[in-house]
Image (spheres, rainbow, N blue to C red):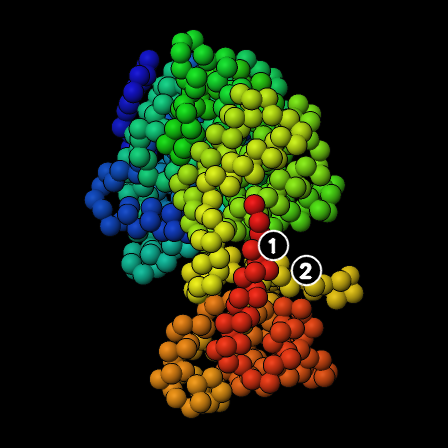
């Protein structure tokens, strides 16, 4: 770790929040919002009182941004969660003690005044000691709270502040403190004992001279609290760099970053995957300015979770504005592929992207992102993207059932093909044709695929099995008979689920033993083990729970209260060769499996 200048000091809270000091701790506007909740509040409170004096709360990393030596000001670049929480703890204590002000003796009233000065600077009425950042209404809620308890002049509490974390944290500590004081029977004295505990707790303040040093520390310190993610660190590095050269426009760049996250959605795993795939898709272009020797990829051959920060630090440092422009454009493309923002997307393309999601085709997103960004140069249009995406869907269905190629090879597979496109100048039909050749060369053969399709597919991969069944059912639908087979309940369970015609449960109903094995239970169990999870014994229904272990005739002919067929005569073409049967036998299962496998092979060709 190479850091130019660093000061490390251990301070008790009484000194960190020194009433006679005019020190201010400000959390930059580009930091993420306050995210601690009940679990962290409880852990901090319990740890304080289950340990002796001088309990270690953790560390904070600050940059000295002082412009007036009489009022030291520190920019908190890590540790805002614990610092904000500590101030909420002190505010709760102040509010409770202030409510009992008339019961305090002179020394206690002096201590109460000192407690107030921990939260607002001496000889001022509204200069806060800790200034939260603005996201999530943190600053407005904090100031409203400080006004409500009399720390700063009166101001309106923001709407719905009580539903957000700043006020919730304050209320949590106030309730815990009041409960402990009541239980102790010591009243006021217990409140001051709690204050002494907080005052004696230790924070380590790490002061560095610049943002680069601060971010170097992120990876080496394992601070207690909510850990910064790779995406947080990329954002902080980017905005810190822009703050140096474009400080007057930082709000604009911060809004641009929020646009990137809006494109990617709230799921951190998706955000992180985008940043990996963004580099892996465009590594040729991204590495060009860094090539000063024989290395083709000086930034790294591939972006992984462990190499992500190192790669993006170099990209940001080289030109933060160019980086932000590119990442904004690419995240917008990614948003269409993931359907996070699909306004104006042609319906056929939307359906293809949806099906690619359903077959767990995310490893191909880097390739699609590359194609879409370079559509003009590659001489391809939306119809080509549809054709390519359908090919990818077929590839992933076959891969998911045969495990060929293995998952670990997928990212490199698409990266290698992008490199092949660039080296050979593929354009137009050649992009699709050579992709097909590439996928065929690494995929299982038709014979291997057919062998898997004849086996217990439901048991081996129920997701791929359901997708295939839905696609087969969809082929027989018209506009009038269309049914959304992907509709979900609020619980995220599918309305239409896989139904085993011959039941899969251990306790095979007697009617089924009689039909499938002429009354021989052992033989029925043998048949169940061999055939129950094969395609020939599977269908989809919106009434699985009402069919369950019923006899074949009841399943086939079942109707709802309005007289509509909900069993195998529900009109789905998938059930046509079941609905006309008078009995369900092993031969019927095997024949249906053979027929379905033949259709599946035709549907999912490469």
Looking at the picture, does residue 384 appear above or below residue 68? below
Q: Name, please, the residue furthest toward the top.
A: 292
The reply to whether residue 174 is visible in this rendering is no
Depth check, front residue: 493 or 80: 493
- The image shows residue 251 at horizontal and vertical percentages of 61, 25
Q: Find numbered disc 1 in the image and state the secondary structure of the residue it sits on.
A: helix
Residue where numbered disc 1 is placed: 603
Identify the residue at horizontal 41%, vertical 33% (top origin): 304
Q: Position of residue 93 (x, y in %)?
A: 40, 46
Q: Residue at x 58, y 30 (%)?
A: 370
Position of 218 with respect to 582 (left or right) is left
Marks 2 and 1, how far apart at CA: 10 Å
**517 and 80: which is toward the camera:** 517
In the image, 196 versus 286, the foreground residue is: 286
Q: Where is residue 58 in the image (x, y as percent from the top left)?
A: 31, 36
Q: Seen in the image, is 289 located left or right of residue 109?
A: right
Q: Quadrant of residue 208?
A: top left
- What residue lies at 35% left-to-right and 84% top-to-bottom? 522
Q: Looking at the image, tell me whether mark 2 or mark 1 is earlier in sequence order.
A: 2
Q: Judging from the image, what secondary structure is the residue with disc 2 in?
A: helix
Say if residue 516 shows up in the picture: yes
- Residue at 42% x, 91% y: name it: 519
Q: In this rendering, would 375 be left or right of 545? A: right
Quarter of the picture containing the C terminus is: top right
| Residue that label 2 marks | 475
Is mark 2 in CB contact (under 8 Å) with mark 1? yes
Q: Nearer the viewer, mark 2 or mark 1?
A: 1
**Image vertical order of residue 491 relative to residue 271, above or below:** below
Pointer 1 local density, CA inside 10 Å: few below 14, some 14–19, many at least 20: some
């Amino acid at each position: 770790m190479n850091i130019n200048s660093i000061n490390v000091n251990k301070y008790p809270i009484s000194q960190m929040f020194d009433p006679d000091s005019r020190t201010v701790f400000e959390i930059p506007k580009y930091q993420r919002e306050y995210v601690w909740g009940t679990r962290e509040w409880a852990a901090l409170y319990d740890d304080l009182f289950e340990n002796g004096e001088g309990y270690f709360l953790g560390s904070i990393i600050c940059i000295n941004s002082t412009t007036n030596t009489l009022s030291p000001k520190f920019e908190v670049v890590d540790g805002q969660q614990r610092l904000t929480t500590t101030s909420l703890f002190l505010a709760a204590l102040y509010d409770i003690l202030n409510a009992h002000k008339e019961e305090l003796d002179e020394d206690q009233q002096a201590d109460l005044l000192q407690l107030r000065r921990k939260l607002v600077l001496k000889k001022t009425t509204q200069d806060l000691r800790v200034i939260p950042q603005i996201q999530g209404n943190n600053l407005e809620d904090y100031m409203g709270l400080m006004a409500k308890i009399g720390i700063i002049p009166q101001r309106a509490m923001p709407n719905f502040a009580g539903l957000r974390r700043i006020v919730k944290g304050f209320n949590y500590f106030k309730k815990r403190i009041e409960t402990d004081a009541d239980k102790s029977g010591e009243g006021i004295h217990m409140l001051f004992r709690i204050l002494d505990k907080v005052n004696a707790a230790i924070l380590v303040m790490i002061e560095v001279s610049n943002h680069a040093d601060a971010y170097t520390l992120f990876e080496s310190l394992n601070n207690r609290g909510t850990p910064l993610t790779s995406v947080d660190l990329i954002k902080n590095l980017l905005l810190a760099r822009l703050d140096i050269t474009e400080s007057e426009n930082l709000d604009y760049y911060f809004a641009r970053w929020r646009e990137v996250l809006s494109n990617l959605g709230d799921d951190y795993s998706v955000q992180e995957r985008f940043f990996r795939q963004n580099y892996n898709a465009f590594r040729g272009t991204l590495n060009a300015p860094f090539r000063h020797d024989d290395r083709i990829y000086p930034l790294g051959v591939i972006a992984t979770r462990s190499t992500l920060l190192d790669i993006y630090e170099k990209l940001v440092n080289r030109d933060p504005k160019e980086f932000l422009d590119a990442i904004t454009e690419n995240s917008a493309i990614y948003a269409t592929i993931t359907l996070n923002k699909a306004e104006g997307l042609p319906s056929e393309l939307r359906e293809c992207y949806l099906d690619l999601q359903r077959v767990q085709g995310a490893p191909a997103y880097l390739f699609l992102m590359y194609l879409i960004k370079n559509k003009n140069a590659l001489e391809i249009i939306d119809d080509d993207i549809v054709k390519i995406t359908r090919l990818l869907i077929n590839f992933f269905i076959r891969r998911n059932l045969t495990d060929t190629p293995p998952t670990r090879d997928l990212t490199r597979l698409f990266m290698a093909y992008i490199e092949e496109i660039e080296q050979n100048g593929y354009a137009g039909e050649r992009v699709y044709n050579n992709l097909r050749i590439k996928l065929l060369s690494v995929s299982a053969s038709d014979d291997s695929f057919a062998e898997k399709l004849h086996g217990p597919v439901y048991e081996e991969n129920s997701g791929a099995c359901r997708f295939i069944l839905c696609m087969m059912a969809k082929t027989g639908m018209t506009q009038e008979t269309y049914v959304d087979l992907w509709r979900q309940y609020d619980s995220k369970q599918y309305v239409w689920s896989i139904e085993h015609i011959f039941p899969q449960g251990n306790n095979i109903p007697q009617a089924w033993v009689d039909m499938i094995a002429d009354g021989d239970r052992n033989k029925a169990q043998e048949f169940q083990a061999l055939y129950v999870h094969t395609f020939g014994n599977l269908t989809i229904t919106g009434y699985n729970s009402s069919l369950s272990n019923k006899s074949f005739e009841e399943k086939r002919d079942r109707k709802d209260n309005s007289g509509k067929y909900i069993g195998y005569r529900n009109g789905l073409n998938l059930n046509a060769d079941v609905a006309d049967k008078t009995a369900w036998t092993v031969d019927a299962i095997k024949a249906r499996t053979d027929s379905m496998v033949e259709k599946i092979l035709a549907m999912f060709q490469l």
